[in-house]
Amino acid sequence: MLISLWTGCKPTKRTFEMICFWFSGLASEDELMAHLAKLQLQDEASSQRN
């Protein structure tokens, strides 16, 4: 639930994986933010199609 509040959308497996990588130090904050920005763009594109 906290991931949903933080990201603003339903978390995918990849989002959960990226957050785990970030917590363990395997991914940088920039990589995590790039992933979240990509999800937001995909969400906006899908809402425009509908």
Image (cartoon, grey):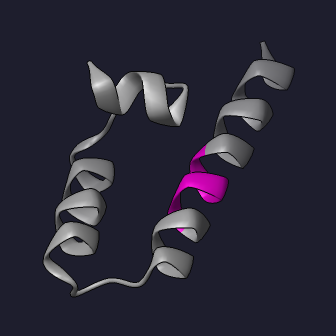
In the image as oriented, which residue stretches furthest toward the top? 50
Range drawn in magenta: 35-39
Q: Nearer the viewer, residue 21 or 44?
A: 21
Q: In which quadrant of the rendered view does residue 10 lie?
A: top left
Instruction: Residue 19 in the image: state x and y as whole percent.
Output: 28, 58
24 left or right, relative to 19: left
In the rendered view, would you say 6 is above or below 15? Answer: above
Is 38 contained in the magenta span? yes
Residue at 21% of width from left, 46% of height from top? Answer: 13
Quarter of the figure with residue 24: bottom left
Q: Is residue 12 visible?
A: yes
Residue lying furthest right in this view? 48
Tell me: residue 35, above or below residue 30: above
Q: Is residue 48 left or right of 37 when viewed as pictured? A: right
Nearest the eye: 45 or 12: 12
Q: x, y percentage for residue 17?
A: 20, 60
User: Residue at point 47% right, 33% down?
Assistant: 6
Residue 11 position in % (x across, y down): 33, 34
Pick the quarter of the image with the C terminus: top right
Query: So how many labels did they put on this image?
Result: 0
- In the figure, 49 relative to 43: above or below? above
What x and y, as percent, mark residue 36? 55, 53
Asked whether residue 10 is in view, the answer is no
Magenta stretch holds residue 2: no
* Magenta highlight: main SS: helix
Q: Is residue 29 above or below residue 39?
A: below
- Tell me the residue at 26%/18% (across/down): 1
**Residue shown at 39% from the left, 24% from the top:** 4
Q: Horizontal placement of 15 versus 31: left or right?
A: left
Front residue (pair 7, 44): 7
